[in-house]
Image: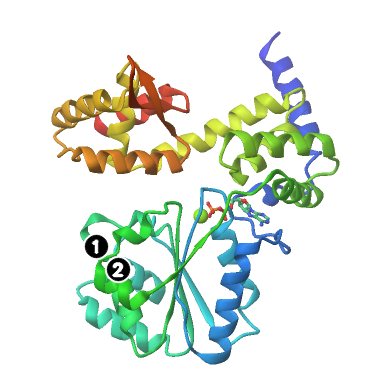
């Protein structure tokens, strides 16, 4: 086949594939559906905001749940929906992109504040947002190490403006990270966004397919929903991506599309890990058998190699549960030589860990 023939053939195929999609934006992760599928846990959030709107008395919330359990969508949807018709102003900031209190407030003020002190900055914030204001801090667990005490939370909870704070996190350990005085003034209600079941996942997929595709097959959507629930901690993103791949590529099986979608998402997750977590994954990859004690030894050696201060065994172990909640590893308690011991298994393609490690520590 010559180049021109190939080019013509592909042009035709891609045109055909694109013809099956009514609206590409529906498959974008930042897309906000006009009618998200309802979930029980969202009611607590909705009620708290409405009551705050009515009474001015804030109730702080900390929502946690696996990746892709709809936390971000729910708050963004409410922010949009309540924008014009209520007396509350919902401000959103993703800590991933603004990882200190200073940067967050600067972002919410829409103005650079070089040289100002945090106290001045917060005073400007109070002046600008003097009415009922909900401050949503997404991915709060990615707050930088320089701001461990999360001063902004302290200020928000102590302010006479009666601000309401909503914190989102993939990790249940979020609350342990807050210092005692912040926790005691914030007193957040903790809400667990449970993993979607296959029915909910299916409902979400049907809604997407309906608005995004010209045609779709319900049996296929069921299959995607079942795979996502079984193999990914119910990550809706993987399901939506799988749907997109199967819809746009001729001859691609659901299983293959799912595998590719999972890989895409894992690459993102691994990229987002901090240095210590990445060192742990790389150590796990390098330790045959995956016995926790041996992995820890590898981890200590590797940390020394790259000039990182390693965690104590206890922190190392805590971090494993974080990695497990990201769906990257499985912690098992197994019998080896007649005694029980902790064993760790990598749940994704180890080449991704190796590659990311190389990029970061090269
Ligand atoms: N209840 C829902 N209805 C419709 N789409 C949803 C729902 N929950 C999640 N999604 C979709 O799933 C994807 C992941 O949701 P997201 O809010 O980003 O999860 P999280 O913030 O918990 O990681 C997004 O594309 C979102 O639109
Ligand atoms: Mg999110």
Furthest residue toward top: 1
Q: Which secondary structure, mark 1?
A: helix
- Which residue is depicted at the point 70% across and 43% down? 198
Nearer-the-camera pick, 66 or 261: 66
Nearer-the-camera pick, 290 or 163: 290
The number of callouts visible is 2
| Percent position of residue 333, x then y | 39, 29
> Spatial distance from mark 1 to mark 2, Cα to Cα?
7 Å
| Percent position of residue 323, x then y | 39, 39
- Which residue is depicted at the point 65% across and 84% down? 85
| Percent position of residue 5, x then y | 74, 15
User: As drawn, is 242 to the left or to the right of 93?
Assistant: right
Nearer-the-camera pick, 222 or 217: 222
- Residue 141 position by quadrant: bottom left
Q: How is the image coloured?
A: rainbow
Mark 1 / mark 2, whichever is N-terminal: 2
User: As drawn, is 29 to the left or to the right of 343?
Assistant: right
Identify residue for label 2. 101
Identify residue for label 1. 147
- Residue 308 position by quadrant: top left
Q: Is residue 113 visible?
A: no
Callout 1 crowding tier (Cα within 10 Å): few <14, some 14–19, many ≥20: few
Q: Which secondary structure, mark 2?
A: helix
Q: Quadrant of the C terminus?
A: top left
- Residue 247 position by quadrant: top right
Whether tag 1 and tag 2 are in contact, CB under 8 A, the answer is yes
User: As drawn, is 110 to the left or to the right of 15?
Assistant: left
Question: Can you tell me whether the CB of the residue at mark 1 lies under 8 Å from the nearest atom of ligand 2?
Answer: no
Per the rendering, the mark at residue 241 is: none
């Amino acid at each position: 086949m010559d180049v021109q023939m190939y080019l013509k053939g592909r042009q035709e195929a891609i045109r055909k594939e694109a013809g099956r999609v009514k609206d590409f934006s529906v498959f974008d992760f930042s897309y906000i559906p006009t009618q998200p599928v309802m979930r029980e846990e969202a009611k607590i959030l909705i009620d708290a905001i409405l009551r705050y709107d009515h009474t001015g008395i804030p109730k702080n919330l900390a929502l946690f749940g696996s990746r892709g359990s709809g936390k971000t969508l729910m708050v963004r949807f409410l922010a949009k929906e309540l924008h014009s018709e209520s007396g509350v102003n919902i401000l959103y900031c993703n800590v991933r992109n603004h990882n200190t209190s200073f940067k967050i407030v600067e972002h919410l003020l829409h103005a650079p504040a070089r040289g100002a002190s945090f106290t001045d900055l917060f005073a400007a914030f109070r002046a600008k947002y003097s009415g009922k204001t909900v401050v949503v801090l997404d991915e709060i667990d990615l707050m930088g190490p320089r701001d461990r005490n999360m001063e902004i939370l302290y200020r928000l909870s102590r302010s006479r403006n009666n601000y309401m704070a909503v914190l989102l996190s993939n990790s249940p350990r979020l609350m342990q990270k807050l210092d005692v005085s912040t926790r005691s003034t914030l007193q957040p209600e903790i809400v667990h966004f449970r993993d979607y079941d296959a029915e909910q996942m299916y409902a979400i997929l049907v809604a997407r397919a309906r608005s995004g595709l010209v045609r779709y097959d319900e049996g296929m959507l069921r299959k995607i929903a079942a795979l996502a629930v079984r193999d990914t901690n119910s990550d809706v993103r993987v399901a939506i991506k799988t749907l997109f791949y199967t819809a746009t590529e001729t001859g691609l099986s659901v299983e293959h599309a799912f595998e590719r979608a999972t890989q895409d998402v894992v690459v993102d997750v691994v990229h987002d890990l901090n240095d210590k977590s990445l060192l742990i994954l790389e150590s796990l990859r390098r330790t045959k058998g995956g016995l926790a004690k041996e992995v820890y030894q590898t981890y200590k050696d590797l940390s020394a190699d790259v000039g990182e201060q390693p965690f104590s065994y206890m922190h190392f172990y805590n971090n494993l549960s974080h990695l497990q909640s990201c769906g990257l590893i499985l912690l098992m308690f197994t019998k080896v030589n007649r005694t029980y011991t902790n064993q760790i298994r990598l749940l994704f393609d180890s080449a991704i860990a190796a590659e990311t490690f190389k990029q970061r520590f090269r």
